[in-house]
Structure formats: structure tokens, C-alpha cells
Image (spheres, coloured by chain):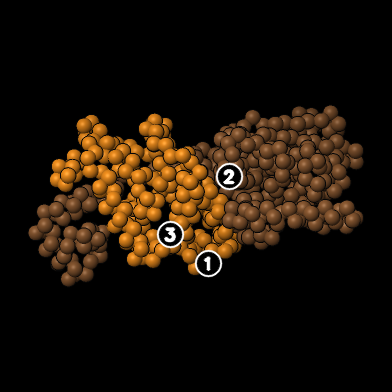
Amino acid sequence: MDDEALLERARHGDRDAFAAIVTRHQDELYTMALRITGTPADAADVVQETFLRAYVRIPMLRGQTIRAWLFRVAINCSHDVQRRTVRRPADPLEDDQGNIVELPDPALGPEATALSRERMTAVRDALLTLHPDFRAAVILRDVNDLSYEEMSAALRVPIGTVKSRLNRGRSTLAKALRGTAAFPGFAEENV
Amino acid sequence: MTRRHVDDLFTAAHDDDLSPIDDARFHAHIRNCKDCSAAFAEFTATVEALHELPKARLPRPIHLPSTPPVAEGSRRPRISLDWLNAGLLRRFPATAIAGAAAAVVIIVALVHNGGGVPGGTASTVAGGDRSAGQMAPAIAPPGSKAQDAACSQSILPITGSSPPASFSAPQVITSPSLPGAQLVLAASALSVKPGQTVTLYAQLSLPVTSLGAPGSTGAAPATRAVRPCVSVGVGTSSQVIGTRSGTFAEPGFGSPAPVHPSSGAATLLGFSVPSGLAPGTELHVVASIPAGFEAPGSPALTATLTLTTS
């Protein structure tokens, strides 16, 4: 059953239908919130708040794509969290406590696994340096694989603005990765 | 085509969003411009690295209201925590405070003139901690007939359950005058952050008096459960945030984690910690059953929890 059908049933009081929506989207919302806030606890709070807001507003949701709407609420919640929280660097221990599924690819050897992990850390940290608007655009597109249309609905901006923010975000991110040990080729070619 | 123009087209080129003519021009420029070629290679590598970031899995359960979604929408006119915290207070704090002050003045004037509090309004904000009568004149002090009547309206029969295992050490209140009765209050966290959603467990268990079969033994005494009147106050001002009748949360909902087997649905309710509270601010959660609720002359029961903002 697709989201729209589930949403319609939820509007008529079917909690199980809403439960299915939660199950379907909770991990991707958490992934997005984690990349925006950089903190598993904050990201989990964001997802909790998102679904609570969605639940009480379901009767008012008409003609909207629930996925884009959930992302929009989650983005706003993430920005709220960031505004009231002093940013701290992601704690690598958090990965080891089972909060994040970042399992190494078993096909990679130890050296490649370490390099892959180093690249992920560099990208993750560089993401946190982006302007919130650019960061959201990059994460929605390249981490969560949203279409331009979904991004436009989630960010409440025209598609042209989506593309502009995405280009700025990706370019700024590429520049931020220059000089990092995980991306040595960047520094060699363009410094 | 200048270098700057090519930079602007990187995303369109990467996402195959260029027109055929622009695509041809773009790649022609890339072939002839070493800087742009290297920059586009970096750009592409960056996007690929983003796609390599692993997906994460939500590590804890989502708590959701157990009442049907449409029910909450129909209750919008009632005062709710969402309305107070996320709406008016956040967007128009000065207007909200001025409006609240005006409402207090009007209600006080009505009470002093013998007009009383309009029926039904007080039920949504009934409760408050023990100093409510001194600090907020509009709210009747606990034990008064006005408050008891209002509080009684929000006391509802529920399906009995135990507090979720992850909750704080529950406050358990009993009374010799009510043998077998137990008022339990617990929270999902005692250290909270502004804006955080906190789930509360509140339940009064009462023994069911029934005529047993002669000679029957061994059966566990039957109980029934009701949700007490619950309120949340901020700091020492004893400002009552409100109660949320009918908006309860259910643990383990849609979660990959095991669901606590004894967790119930209707005993849980959630509220959002107001934004802007300074660290160290205390929020007082009060669950109360007014005197005379169970039977004429039965005592009042009150359980309190103190949450602290971090």
C-alpha cells in the first residue's frame, strides 16, 4: 500500500496505517537528521518530534506528499535543534554503541576499510560546515535520494532554487574536502 | 564559456539536467580547460562520497499518541501543549504573554464578582502544583471544589499497565484510607532539553470490590485503572502548562527495538518542554486525584516529579 493510501486511512483514524508510515520513513528521516545535526541523540529527538507533529496534523494534510512533508518537518526540527544546541563534533564512540549503522563493507580489506571510514568522517564533518540551506539540499539529494520535486516541496522553494542550493552546497563541500587526508587527490590537483 | 559559468553547471551536468546543446558546450569546455576539468572531477568525487555515506537506523522507539489521528484534530479548540508551546508562545511571545495576563485578569474579575469560571474551560488546565493558588490566582488551589471538579473531568478510565521499563523511578503514592489503591507517576526522562518531547506515565489503580464466590481463593484481586489529572508547571511560578486529555503516547511503536510487554497505551501522555527555558529550570509534574473521587470522604492523592532542563 502506498503512502497516499496509508495517509487516507490514517485520516480516518487508522493508527495501524500511520504506524506503517512511521515504519517506512523513520530510518530515512533519522539518516537525514543525523547528517544535519551530527548527533544521534538530537537526530532521534528530531524524528520523534516529526512524527508527533505529523500525527496531530494528519487531518489537515490534503493533497501533499507525505514523504516530502515529513522531510520538511524534520528539517525544521533539525534546525530548531541546532539553534538551541552548541554544536559539538560527532563522537566517534557513538558509532560503536550501535546508534548508527555504519558497518564496514566486508569485501574491503582492513586498509581499504580504514580509508573508507576516514573518507566518511571527512565528508560527515565537512557537511556540518555548510550553510544550513546548502547542507539540507545536499543531504536530501545525495544522502536521501529525493527528486528535485520532492526537494522543492520539502524545502518550500522553487526547483530552480533547489538546483542552485544543491550546486553551491556540493561545490562548497568539494572545496572543504581539499587538503583533507582522506581526499589527497583534491589537494594535489587544485591547490 | 568562462570558468565561473562552468562551475554553475556542475550539478546540472552531473545530474544529466543540461540541454543537449549546453551539454555539448560544457564537455567541450571541460576537455580544453584543465582547471575546470579538475574541479569537475573533484565535484563528481564529492557527490560519490556523499552517496557512500551509510544509512542510519533509528536507535530507539517512536512514541505516538494512541488516540486516532482524527480525534486530535477535532479537539483543536481545547488548550493543548502543542498550541501553547509551538504556536503562539514561539511565534508571538509578547502577544501570548499579554493575552494570558489579560485572560487572568478577566477570570479573576469574574471569580471575585461571583461569576465563576466558565464550565469546561478549566478542565483543560486543571491541576497545578501545591502553590498554584498562591502564585496564580486564576487557578484554584488544590483541594478546592472548583479545581476538584475541573480535575475530575479529566480523569478517565483506562486500560491498566505498568510503567515502561526505561522510565524514571516511578513515584508511587498510596493511602491507608484507600487500601489497594496506588497512584503511580513516571517520566521518560528527568533531565530534559527545551523543545524535547517528554512522555509521562500516570495511573491510579483501584481495587474492584465484588462479591466473590463462596470458598473461592487464590485469584488475584481485580483492579481497575484511571488516568489522574496531570499538569506540568515551570519553575517556581507554578504556571500550569496544561493537560493533554486524549493525546497519549505508546512506546515501542514502529520500532526495531523490543516492545516492553507490559507497556500500555492510555496511561502515557506527552508534552513538549517549552523553548527558551534556561538550563537548570525545574518543571514540576503533578498527578492528582481529588478528595472524594473514589467515594465520599476518600482522601486526595498527589504524586509529583521534578524534571530539570539541561
Q: Are marks 2 and 3 on the same chain?
A: no
Quickly name the residue at label 2: B276
**What subunit carries mark 1?**
A
Query: What separation in Å lies between label 2 and label 1 (alpha carbons)?
Result: 32 Å
A159 is higher (above) or lower (below) than B179:
below
Report the side of B34 relative to A74 (left or right): left
B126 or B281, which is in the foreground?
B281
Question: Who's the residue at 40% across and 41% down the image?
Answer: A38
Residue B310 disc label: none
Circle 2: element type: loop
Classify residue B276 as left or right of residue A3: right
Q: Nearer the viewer, residue B84 or B248?
A: B84
Q: Nearer the viewer, mark 3 or mark 1?
A: 3
The Cα atoms of the two marked residues, 3 and 1, are separated by 15 Å
Specify the chain shown as orange. Answer: A
Residue A108 in sight from this viewpoint: no
Asked if the residues shown at circle 2 and circle 1 are in contact, with their CB atoms under 8 angstroms apart, the answer is: no
Subunit bearing disc 3: A
Check disc 1 and report the residue beneath it.
Answer: A62
Q: Could you say where residue A52 lies in the image, as x and y percent from the top left?
A: 56, 51
Instruction: Look at mark 3 in the image and give the residue it sits on.
Output: A154
Q: Position of residue B62 (x, y in %)?
A: 53, 45
Q: Return the residue found at the far left.
A: B32
Tags 3 and 1 both on a single chain: yes
